[in-house]
Image: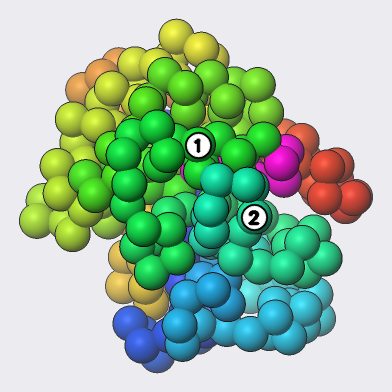
């Protein structure tokens, strides 16, 4: 099986890490034979990332470039333990895809209970498709609690290629991710592989994420990157809660 979807990427709109545009990312996705590319720029809560108006205007952006279906969404910050995200709810509910992640600039790393409460509250809004990189050493988590919340709300747990790449900046992601995979298998929670490529260079590259799935004998049917049907089923569950029509 071959991944045909990248669920997590960033363009110039996310700030200073890259000057590549959505067109550059789409070209790279086509070159790597992806069928669907999710562009998930940082929410306005991250300094130097895009404004609300940028996200509002995405509805006018081209849905296909170089034959790749583009989904325009956000990697929204978890702001606190109330379920508040870094993009206004009215705008969030217009996104094709919503990832919720913790970044130190918006959610100061705390103890496992508080970090977990932040993610669980975000997931419990029913509007979050994917929990982004819950493998960051800076954020200890009560993994069972997070995975149970994801099971309840149909949210996927991300296997983040940037985290899993040796020397990655989130510490020892691999052992955390292996534990998460075991829990996801037990609870029937889906997993999404996201390159987290800032710019075009790593779009659609899942070398270490796929290696870990293989090493842990994780069932393919719980991974959304291999089929449009599985991926859209994940998104449609939350699109309903965001008041959007299903993707077909
Ligand atoms: Zn992130
Ligand atoms: Zn990201």
| Residue under the image location 18 percent in, 59 percent down | 169
Of residues 116 and 132, the one drawn nearer to the viewer in this rendering = 116
Farthest residue in the top direction? 186
Query: Quick check: is the Cβ at mark 1 less than 8 Å away from ligand 1?
Result: no
Quadrant where the C terminus is found in the figure:
top right
Q: Quadrant of residue 130?
A: top right
| Image: 51 above or below 75 | below
Front position in the image: 142 or 28: 142
Q: Which residue is mark 1?
A: 117
Instruction: Give how far across and how far down residue 27 sits, in percent.
Output: 48, 76
89 on left or right of 180: right
Indicate the quadrant where residue 114 lies. top left
Residue 101 on image: x %, y %: 47, 53
How is the protein colored in the picture?
rainbow
| Range of residues picked out in magenta | 125-131
- Per the image, label 2 sits on a secondary structure element best described as loop
Vertical position of residue 237 compared to residue 61: above or below: above
Q: Nearer the viewer, residue 159 or 210?
A: 159
Residue depicted at 51% across the width and 41% down the height: 119
Find disc 2 in the rendering and name its residue. Answer: 84
Question: Which residue sits at x=38%, y=77%?
Answer: 199
Q: Earlier in the sequence, mark 2 or mark 1?
A: 2
Q: CA distance from mark 2 to mark 1?
A: 12 Å
Q: Residue at x 53, y 15 (%)?
A: 188
Say if the magenta span includes residue 128.
yes
Report helix, strand or loop for mark 1: helix
Count of numbered labels shown in the rendering: 2
């Amino acid at each position: 099986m071959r991944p045909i979807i990248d669920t997590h990427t960033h363009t110039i709109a996310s700030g200073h890490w890259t000057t590549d545009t959505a067109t550059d990312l789409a070209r790279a996705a086509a070159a790597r034979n992806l069928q669907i590319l999710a562009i998930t720029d940082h929410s306005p809560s991250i300094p130097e990332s895009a404004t609300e108006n940028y996200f509002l205007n995405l509805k006018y952006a081209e849905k296909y470039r170089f034959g790749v279906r583009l989904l325009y969404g956000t990697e929204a910050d978890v702001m606190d333990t109330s379920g508040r995200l870094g993009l206004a709810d009215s705008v969030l509910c217009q996104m094709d895809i919503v990832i919720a992640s913790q970044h130190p600039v918006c959610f100061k790393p705390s103890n496992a209970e508080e970090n977990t409460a932040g993610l669980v509250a975000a997931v419990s809004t029913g509007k979050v498709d994917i929990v982004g990189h819950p493998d960051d050493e800076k954020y200890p988590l009560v993994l069972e609690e997070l995975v149970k919340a994801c099971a309840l709300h149909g949210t996927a747990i991300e296997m983040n290629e940037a985290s899993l790449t040796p020397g990655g900046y989130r510490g020892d992601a691999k052992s955390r991710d292996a534990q998460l995979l075991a829990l996801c298998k037990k609870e029937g929670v889906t997993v999404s592989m996201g390159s987290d490529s800032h710019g075009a260079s790593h779009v659609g590259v899942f070398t270490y994420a796929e290696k870990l799935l293989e090493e842990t004998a994780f069932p393919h049917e719980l991974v959304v990157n291999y089929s449009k049907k599985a991926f859209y089923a994940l998104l449609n569950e939350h699109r309903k809660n965001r008041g959007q029509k299903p993707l077909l």
